[in-house]
Amino acid sequence: MIRYGMSIYFILGIIGNIFNCIIFTRPHYRRSASSIYFLAFSVFAIFYLILSIGRYFHALNSVDLQTHSIIFCKTRLYVTHVLGQYLRFCVVFVCVDRFLATRAGTRILLVNSIASAKKLLLLMTIVCPLIAIHLPILMEIRNNVCSQFGVYKLAYAIYQLIIVGIAPPVLMSVFSVLAIRSLQRRHSGHERAKQRDRHLMKMVIVEVILHIVISIPYSINLLYAALTYSISKSIEQIEIELFVSFLTTFSIYLISVMPFYLFLLTSTLFRKEFFSLFLKYYHRRILPTIF
């Protein structure tokens, strides 16, 4: 699963996020604060994939540094956890921005929304590492396992459940629902929403669904492992739980892989922008080399 499954979606994720970076810097999207958040998401996702999955690839053919170096053990989980939080809160900010964009009374406030987006992203890059500072302090290596132990294992599971499984999905859901209701009111009031706003809203919705579907099982598994940590288990049960834990970890990385492909499927505007960019590159760069 690591050698082939992770390799495939690692490549797809890097390619998809590079395309996202290119598209969200295009003039058509550059005027929206949501595009700034999606652009930041894509940049963070590239680093998240490299640092998260790269360790698995290295461990396939050599010593797993995470089980032999306490510095690597503490640093890798801390950095990847912080990057994962960046991804989640970028989506939360997009949901908030889409809600504000549908409120007629906030149009004046949105004039400087791009500047506000940059300030929020800067604040996020400072706050998230501070919230997770307990990780490099309390992580340990025991019996060649880099993990949480004792009371901290339960505390970390509860922390993960709240900060990953509950808070971001709830915030995403609330502001997405509010944005959809505002859009419906605008339509019922004979106000025509801009095409870009509608397509961005579709992209936000699929992103929110992806986060909810993937994040909750991962957090629940962490909580289950912590609650049953001191219970005696058979070898077969331990193997099953380890496999389930691997599957939930395996799937959590899809958050950073799927957005580009979901955007292609759900947004006609995004799809047109991508194919227009691809054809332009083909005619300028590839065709001249053939003929």
Image (spheres, rainbow, N blue to C red):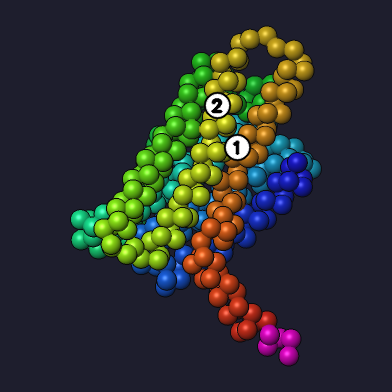
Q: Which mark is residue 106?
A: none
> Is residue 102 something one can see in this rendering?
no
> Is residue 215 something one can see in this rendering?
yes
Quadrant location of the N terminus in the rendered image: top right
In the image shown, does 270 or 252 lie closer to the viewer?
270
Direction from residue 88 to residue 56 in the image, left or right: right
Q: Which mark is residue 220?
A: 2
Quadrant location of the C terminus in the rendered image: bottom right
Residue for point 73% across, 17% down: 237
Disc nearest the viewer among 2 and 1: 2
In the image shown, does 288 or 52 lie closer to the viewer?
288
The x, y position of residue 25, in whole percent, is: 45, 68
From this view, report whether residue 95 is shown above or below residue 283.
above
Task: Write down the quadrant of residue 40 in the picture.
Answer: bottom left
Span highlighted in magenta in the image: 287-291
Residue for point 47% across, 45% down: 208
Question: How many neighbours does mark 2 have within 10 angstroms: few (below 14), some (14-19), or many (20 or more)?
Answer: some
Dot 2 and dot 1 residues touching (CB under 8 Å): no
Kindly identify the amino acid type of the residue bearing the numbered disc 2: Ile
Residue for point 74% across, 42% down: 2
Task: Write down the quadrant of residue 283 in the picture.
Answer: bottom right
From this view, report whether residue 13 is shown above or below residue 142.
below
The x, y position of residue 216, in whole percent, is: 53, 33
Q: Which mark is residue 72?
A: 1
